[in-house]
Image (tube, rainbow, N blue to C red):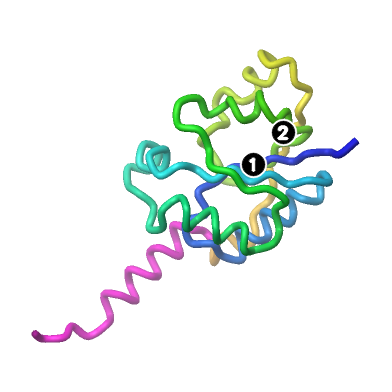
Amino acid sequence: MIKQVMVFGTFDTFHPGHEYFLKHAKKYGDFLIVVIARDRTVKTVKGRLPKNNEIKRKKRVEESGVPDKVILGQLKNKFNLIKKLKPDVICLGYDQKYLTDKLESKLKEFHLKTKVIRLKSFKPHKYKSSLLKISELKAQSLKPKLKT
């Protein structure tokens, strides 16, 4: 029987930390499913839209070659994909908060014996999306302004 692993994330600026996360998660099974957060979900959770839209983010994760399947999350019920796909393992990022609040109770409600594993970070001082965004903003502010 194929052991399915599921992960969730925005993956806005795909970086080595994301790749590490996906590769590490894949070690827990045979088939890795990545659920990409929808733009509206990101706006609700983070208070802003992602830099890259959901289609670009999905494509970039697919291009990494790590996951076996990449799908967009659902807008209305974030737990429907878990109920439908019945993963054997769900891997969470070291700092992932969204989805975790009711995850254990939903797994019980769906009568699933899905194992939930929180993965360790990969150089969070360097490859955390929010830090990369700050570095990008600093770099942009240092660029000389062109007069028009």
Left or right: residue 95 compared with residue 67: left
Q: Quadrant of residue 83?
A: top right
Q: Are marks 1 and 2 in contact (CB under 8 Å)?
A: yes
Left or right: residue 44 compared with residue 66: left
Q: Percent position (x, y) of residue 57?
A: 50, 56
The answer to whether 111 is drawn above or below residue 99 in the figure is: above
SS under mark 2? strand
Query: Which residue is more in the foreground, 5 or 85?
Result: 85
Q: Residue 120: say if magenta.
A: no
Q: Magenta-highlighted stretch: main secondary structure? A: helix
Which image quadrant: the N terminus?
top right
Q: Percent position (x, y) of residue 90?
A: 70, 37
Q: Amino acid at mark 1?
A: Leu
Left or right: residue 36 compared with residue 46: right
Pointer 1 residue: 92
Q: Residue 147: say if magenta.
A: yes
Q: Which residues are magenta?
A: 128-148
Q: Percent position (x, y) of residue 138?
A: 33, 72
